[in-house]
Amino acid sequence: MSDRRDRRKLLQVVYFFGAVVGAGTSITSVQGGLAFPVLVGIALLLGVTDVCLTTTDRAFCYDVVGPEEAVNGIALNMLGDKAFGFFGALAAGSLLAVWGAGAAFAAIAAAYLLGALSLALIPRTPRPSHVEGEEEPPMFKSLILLWKNKNVIVLAIVVAAAEILAFSSDVVLPSFAMHVLQVGESGLGAMYAVRNLGSVIGLVVLASLPRRLYRGPLVLWLGAFFGLGLVAFSAAPTYLLSLLLLGVVGAIWASVDSLLPALLQYGVRDGERGAAVGVWNFSRGLGPLGHLEVGALAAALGAPLAQGINGVLLFLIMGSFALLYRARRFGWSE
C-alpha cells in the first residue's frame, strides 16, 4: 500500500488508528477491563501500528527530502523520535503513577491525533510511481523484491544480523547492571541514559555527513565496530568504562538503524521503495530470535560471555560483507 497510495494520507490513517487504540484502551482501563488477554490484544494492535508507521514514514521521509538528503532526513527523523520519546516516557510514567493507566493511554491517543494533524502541515509530495509491467499483488511485493534483488538480500541479512546479534543486547543489560557491575537499578538507568545520549550524538554526526560517505560500505564497517564495541563492553573491568563504551555503542546503534532503511531505498526503483522498507521491517521482526538466543547463552555461560560471543559473530559477518563489497561482489552506491 505504501507504494500505491499517497504516503502522507496513509500515515494519517495509521495515526488515527493509533489514536483509536489508545482511546479505547484508556476507556477500557477506566472501566477496569484490562485483563491479560485484553492487554495481549492491545499489544498486538500497537505492534501493527508501529510496523505500519515505520514502513511508511521512512519512505515518506525520502519523498520529502529527496534522494540526496535521504540519510540525513531519516537520521533527523530518528533524532526527533528519541528526543520526544525521552520526554514522552517521563510524561507517561508520571501520568501512570498519579492518575493510572487510563490517563497514560489517553495521552498516547492525544499524541497520535496530534501526529495525524501535524502531517497536514507538510506540502503534498508526488504519488509513488508504479513499476512498469508489475502484476504481483501488493501483499507479496516485499518478498518478491527480497528474492530478486541481490542488494536487497544483502542488506536484509545485515539488518537481521544486527537485530539478532546486536540489538538483542538490551536483554542482558539488566544482568550486567545487577550481577556483573553490581550498580543496581539506578546504575541501570544511567546505562540506558548514556547509550541514548550516544545515539543522539551519533545521529547528529550522521545527519551532517556528505552523501559520498554513506553511500559506500560505511554501514558495514559501522556494523563491524558495533560488534567490537559489544565485545569491549562485555569485558570492561569498571563501571565508568562500561558507560563510555555504551555511549559509543549507542552512537553506532542509531547510525546503523538510520542508514539501513535509506540504503534499501537507494538500491531499488522508485515504485519499489515502500516494499524495500517493508523488507527492512520484516528483517527487524527476527529480533526476538536474538532475545531468545542471547538469553539462553547468558543462562548457560553468563551475560559477559554471551554478549562477547554475539559481538564476535557480528564483527565476522559485517567484516566479511565489507570485504565482499570491496571486491565489488555487490554495491548500492550506483
Image (cartoon, helix red, strand yellow):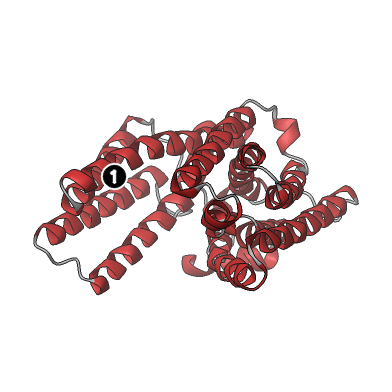
Q: Residue furthest right?
A: 327
Q: Along the line of sight, which residue is nearer the eye, 178 or 125?
A: 178
> Which residue reaches farthest front?
182
- Residue 157: image location, x then y, percent: 69, 62
| Image quarter of the C terminus | top right
Q: Residue 97, how many percent across, how many down? A: 22, 46
Q: What element does badge 1 sit on?
A: helix
Depth check, front residue: 234 or 116: 234
Taking the image as drawn, is residue 98 in sight? Answer: yes
In this view of the protein, which residue sits in the foreground, 239 or 28? Answer: 239
Say whether residue 125 is left or right of residue 307: left
Tell me what residue is drawn at x 64 percent, y 70 percent. Answer: 297
Q: How many numbered tags mark residues here?
A: 1
Residue count near mark 1 (Cα–Cα under 10 Å), binned few <14, some 14–19, many ≥20? some
Q: Which residue is mark 1?
A: 93
Picture quarter containing residue 307?
A: bottom right
Look at 62% across and 40% down and name the residue there.
Answer: 255
Q: Amino acid at mark 1?
A: Gly
Q: Position of residue 262 (x, y in %)?
A: 61, 44
* Residue 155: % across, % down: 69, 56
| Point 66% across, 42% down: residue | 238
Q: Is residue 69 visible?
A: no
Q: Quadrant of the N terminus?
A: bottom left
Describe residue 272's horizontal placement relative to residue 165 as left or right.
Answer: left
Q: Quadrant of residue 250?
A: top right
